[in-house]
Every structure is written in structure tokens, then in C-alpha cells.
Image (cartoon, coloured by chain):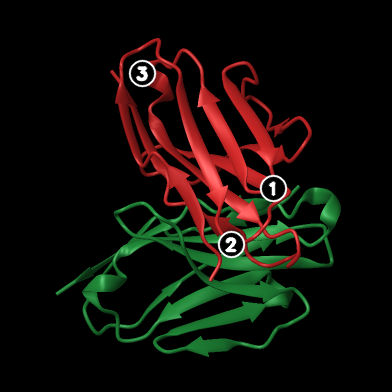
Chain colours: A green, B red
Amino acid sequence: AQKVTQAQTEISVVEKEDVTLDCVYETRDTTYYLFWYKQPPSGELVFLIRRNSFDEQNEISGRYSWNFQKSTSSFNFTITASQVVDSAVYFCALSEASGGSNYKLTFGKGTLLTVNP
Amino acid sequence: GAVVSQHPSRVICKSGTSVKIECRSLDFQATTMFWYRQFPKQSLMLMATSNEGSKATYEQGVEKDKFLINHASLTLSTLTVTSAHPEDSSFYICSARDLVRVGQPQHFGDGTRLSIL
């Protein structure tokens, strides 16, 4: 069975601080995908990144960066120089990479990030 | 980019009413669509996997007769909450997987806030 753990329920920072959101996952599959989604107060899910289990390269996109450590089953997300608009719930998710599973997503419980001015 | 349209965005109705929610993939074909439910301050929980032309696959604990799913075409899946009661009030969100671009991230609709009085 798959499991995604986001141990941080809520994080509060002051604008311009860097913040890291943790994600630890469990799966028996050797091939899988990891995702991060942002859910602002309006409710829609905004896709941020997908990472294949074979690709352990870290990625940077603007103020966002992701650290994938297969050895520790972690896929952490860092926001540099946070802004008020970053305030949202962030979900880490995992899907199997086999067609038989229909690529079902398993979500973590989410981390509520509040960036204060 | 790929767009999933979910309608309506908000429903308020009396107890005992049946409510239909539509999920459409606008610029791609989706043999598989997913329906999630999210209670306030909680994560997204997969309710069922909707398969075009066949019966939906429900997750454990989800009542099939309560949550009717129809996936009649490659671009449309509907979720009907039958005889809704206040405990069915929740945020329902659908996602669709592109038939051609296998493994690509699921595309999410903007969700439907259902409030049963």
C-alpha cells in the first residue's frame, strides 16, 4: 500500500523567509511518480511538479525547488523568499506508474502554509 | 494546457435532493477520471475511479448507490449524489487522465462545493 506523510500540519513564516515543506512516502513499487500540488483558499488544485522515481535530480523553478532523496523516501519542497501569495495548502502525492493502477494518486494530509507580511 | 471543467462550482440544496456534478475534459480524451472528496481542512480522499464505457471502481467505504458515477464518453464523467444529506456536504473535485499522454499529471477540475441544508 502507498502512503504519503506530511508531518507539518501548519507552518507560519514571515514574508521573505525561506520555508521547506517535508514529504515522506512509502511504496512497494520501483517505478512511481511524485507530485506537489498547491491549493489556495479558492479550492482549485494547482499542479507544481511531477518527478519520476528514476529521476533524482533536484529541480528549481523560480523561487521553488524540490529535493528528491530516494534513499530516505523524501521529496521536500522549498520556497525561497516566500511571499504572501504563497499562502495555501500544499499537498504531496504519489502515484504508481503501472497502467493497471490507473495511476491513482495518494495524497498526503497537506501542509497549510501562511506567509505573513 | 489541458483543461478540466467541473460544473457546478457551488450547490446549496435541501436535504433529500439529488445533485449531479459534471466533469469534462475540454481538449483531451480521458478514459479514466477520478472523483475525490475533501472535508474542511482535510486531504483529498479518492472516492472512485470512473472508466469510460464500464462500471466505476469505488474505494472501500464509499457507497455505490449513494454516489452514482456515469462515464458515458471520453470527455464526460458525472457524479450524482443521491438523496443528499447534510453529512454529504463537502468539496468534490474531479480529475482526468489523458488517454494519450500516459503518466502525465492528472488534470483537476476546480471543484464543487456542496452544501446540504
Specify the farthest residue to the top.
B16
Q: Count the marks: how many?
A: 3
Residues tagged by mark 3 and mark 1 found on one chain of the structure: yes
| B26 vs A27, nearest the viewer | B26
Q: Amino acid at mark 2?
A: Asp
Give the letter of the chain under mark 3: B
Query: Where's the C terminus of chain B, which quadrant?
Result: top left
Query: Comparing marks 3 and 1, which lies closer to the viewer?
Result: 1
Q: Amino acid at mark 3?
A: Pro
Q: Secondary structure at mark 2?
A: loop
* Badge 2 density bin: few <14, some 14–19, many ≥20, Cα 10 Å: few
Q: Which residue in the structure is indicated by mark 3?
A: B86
Q: What percent of the width, then of the height, locates residue B80? A: 53, 25
- Residue at image point 75% right, 73% down: A53
Q: Which residue in the structure is indicated by mark 1?
A: B74
Q: Indicate whether A86 appears above or below B63.
A: below
